[in-house]
Structures are given as C-alpha cells and as structure tokens.
Image: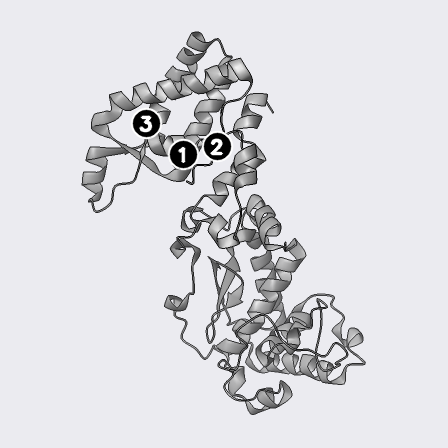
C-alpha cells in the first residue's frame, strides 16, 4: 500500500472513526459477515431436525438474546465488522469466534423454539427443567448465578455452566447440544442421566411440534434496542478511552470535515432538501478529478497523493452524511481546495498529513 494511503486509512484512524460514530450511524449489513453464513446453516439444521414452521426474525442490536415470548433474535452489532470485533475485545474483554457465533445462533433458536410453542406452560417441560413460578419473571437480572460444577443434571458445552442459570437457559443450552451436528451427545452425556433425559425430551418435543404452526403471533414491535435506535457512540457503549487513538490516528479528518460541511438539515420536505442543499459526497465527486489534476501542480506532490486525500475525504463525507447549501457551493469549493492543498503540502514537507493530532471530540 502507498505510504500516503497507509497514513490516511491506518487501522488506528479507522478505529477512532468507529469509536466516535453513533451506533445508529454504523450502516451495518448482514451481507459479507459471518451471520450471512451462519444463519442459513442453522436454519437448515432446524429444517433437517424436523423444525419446519419456526422462522425466527434476526436483527442487529446491542447484544445477543431472544425477546421473551417471541421468536425474535437479536445479534450483537460489535460482531458485524472486524474492527468492531477488535475494539470489543480491547475494551470489553471478549471476542466471539465464528464457531461461537454458530453456537450462539443455535442457542437463541432454542429460546425461539421454546417461546414459539410456549413450552414453559407444559407440565412435562416444567417438571423436567425444574420450572418454579413465572417462567420469565424469575429470570436473574444480572449475569451472576450460582452453579454446582460437579452437577450431572445439565449439559455444559462451553464449560461455563450456563445451563444452571435458569430453566430458560437450561433448555436453550440443551437444545444447542441436541441440534449441533456431530455433537455425539448420547456418548458425551451417557453418564449424566438427567442431562441425557433432557436431550432425549428435546427430540421428543421437536418430533411432536416441529411441523406444527407456532402458537404466538410474531410482533416485530417487540424488538429491543435495534441498533438503528442507539444514539450512543461506540466509545460510549464500550466505555472506551480514546487518547491512545488520538495520538496514533494519522488520517483522522472527521472534525475538519464537520467544520467544512454540515449535518443533513431536518424538518424539510425531500423537495425542499434537494432544492436548497446537496450532499457533500456529490459535491466532492463533482470536483474530484479537477483537484487531483490541479493540486499536484501547485504543491509538487505526486498525483496519487492528491487522489488518496480526495478518496479519504469523499469516504468520510459519505459516512458522516455531510451536506452543504447550494448557494455556498463556490465558497465551499475554495475551502475544499485550500484544505486538500494544505494536507498535500503537509505531507510533502513533513511526511505526515496532520501536523497536530487534535483530541476534538467528534
């Protein structure tokens, strides 16, 4: 990679950009992620197991879970981008592998199966999984739970004894083991009679209910914390400290671009918006080639340097959804030209684009 481009798009720079981004502006997609692979695989596992009428809804949220009483499954936004995964590990202390994510989806599908067929109301289910009282209201509020490490009543696929947290988790963990191909659960749990009984019972439930219509009316309004509604920045959510990244980010231009352009105007009709304003992205594209040609002539840098600078500015203006007033287009062209020229001169004279890394809180 060219040195200029490496500076502008350095890992530290891109991480700082992510950390300062409100979660609802991350523009996350399933395509190209592990979820685009894992969800169809697990859905096929369900089908082959005989569960044909359950169609869980998956959405991106602040963590993993299944909405109580609904087959609606949330997935952690921090696993939808490699750099977000790195930041989550750095600031929150854990990282899910691809195999972990497959198991998480199986686990949440276990909850979805339980809720979709209201298993918690069945006498045989409540007796075997030791349900006492209201199934949902008795769920522990925190992540701490008591467990017996020597118990043979529960499956324990991950070594964390999570099945002992609550009957809800007991069934979901049992379902995960039962569903996972080549888990060899009959052999693994042959000396765990209660756990083995739960696994066999899970198979009986699937044989009985798997091809029956689900018993709940799915309501997507029940979704909890869809990522599009979270206004916190990634840094705020993760409790991240940014000084390290401000010191090392060699291409962090977001504060400059926010000063040069403006956020999208609100409370305007679409017609009013586009008649009075234009996207900064479109504005930069319209003048990009001219600046790539002119700035190297004025500064003496190679044209690839100007190209990389404009590419960086264009990329971030799009990500930040920046705009400008049409009547200011000529003024903004002068400002943009001056800014690109200054960055290129900085690079020519010092080998750096940013002479001082400013801890401006974006």
Quadrant of residue 209 in the image? bottom right
User: What residue is at 58 percent from the left and 83 percent from the top?
Assistant: 208
User: In the drawing, does residue 281 fall left or right of residue 155?
Assistant: left
Secondary structure of the residue carrying numbered label 1:
helix
Q: Are marks 1 and 2 in contact (CB under 8 Å)?
A: yes
Asked whether 18 or 196 is in front, the reply is 18
The image position of residue 255, as x and y in percent, is 40, 34
Asked whether the viewer can see residue 361, the reply is yes
User: In the drawing, does residue 354 fall left or right of residue 288?
Assistant: right
Q: Are marks 1 and 3 in contact (CB under 8 Å)?
A: no
Q: Are marks 2 and 3 in contact (CB under 8 Å)?
A: no
Q: Quadrant of the N terminus?
A: top right
Secondary structure of the residue carrying numbered label 2:
loop
Q: Quadrant of the C terminus?
A: top left
User: In the drawing, does residue 60 fall left or right of residue 157?
Assistant: left
Q: Residues within 10 Å of mark 1 (few under 14, many from 20)?
A: few
Residue receiving disc 1: 255
Return the mark for residue 98: none
Q: CA distance from mark 2 to mark 3?
A: 20 Å
Is residue 309 depicted above or below 205 in this figure? above
Asked whether 123 or 314 is in front, the reply is 314
Return the mark for residue 283: 3
Secondary structure of the residue carrying numbered label 3:
helix
User: What residue is at 56 percent from the left and 69 percent from the top?
Assistant: 109
The image position of residue 350, as x and y in percent, is 54, 17
Tag in front: 2 or 3: 2
Asked whether 325 or 188 is in front, the reply is 325
Tag in front: 1 or 3: 1
Q: CA distance from mark 1 to mark 2?
A: 8 Å
Residue receiving disc 2: 252
User: In the drawing, does residue 59 fall left or right of residue 91?
Assistant: left
Q: CA distance from mark 1 to mark 3?
A: 18 Å
């Amino acid at each position: 990679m060219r040195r200029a481009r490496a500076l502008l798009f350095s890992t530290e720079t891109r991480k700082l950009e992510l950390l300062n981004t409100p979660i609802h502006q991350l523009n996350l997609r399933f395509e190209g992620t592990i979820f685009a692979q894992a969800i169809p695989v697990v859905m096929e596992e369900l089908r082959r197991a005989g569960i044909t009428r359950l169609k869980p809804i998956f959405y991106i949220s602040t963590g993993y879970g299944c909405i109580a009483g609904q087959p609606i499954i949330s997935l952690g936004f921090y696993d939808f981008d490699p750099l977000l995964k790195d930041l989550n590990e750095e600031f929150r202390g854990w990282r899910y592998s691809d195999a972990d994510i497959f198991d998480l989806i199986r686990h949440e599908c276990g909850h979805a199966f339980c809720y979709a067929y209201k298993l918690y109301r069945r006498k045989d289910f409540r007796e075997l999984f030791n349900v006492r009282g209201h199934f949902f209201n008795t769920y522990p509020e925190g992540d701490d739970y008591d467990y017996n490490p020597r118990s043979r009543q529960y499956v324990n696929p991950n070594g964390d004894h999570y099945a002992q947290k609550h009957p809800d988790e007991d069934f979901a963990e049992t379902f995960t083991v039962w569903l996972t191909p080549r888990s060899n659960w009959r052999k693994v749990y042959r000396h765990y009679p209660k756990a083995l009984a739960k696994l066999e019972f899970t198979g009986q439930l699937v044989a009985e209910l798997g091809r029956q219509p689900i018993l709940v009316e799915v309501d997507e309004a029940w979704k909890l914390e869809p990522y599009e509604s979270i206004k916190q920045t990634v840094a705020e959510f993760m409790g991240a400290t940014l000084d390290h990244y401000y010191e090392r980010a060699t291409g962090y231009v977001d504060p400059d671009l926010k000063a040069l352009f403006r956020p999208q105007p609100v409370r305007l009709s679409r017609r009013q918006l586009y008649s009075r304003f234009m996207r900064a992205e479109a504005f930069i594209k319209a003048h990009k080639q001219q600046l790539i040609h002119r700035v190297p002539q004025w500064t003496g840098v190679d044209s690839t340097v100007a190209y990389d600078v404009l590419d960086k500015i264009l990329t971030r203006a799009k990500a930040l959804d920046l705009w400008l007033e049409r009547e200011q287009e000529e003024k903004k062209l002068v400002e943009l030209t001056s800014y690109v020229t200054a960055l290129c001169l900085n690079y020519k004279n010092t080998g750096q684009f940013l002479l001082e890394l400013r801890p401006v809180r974006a």
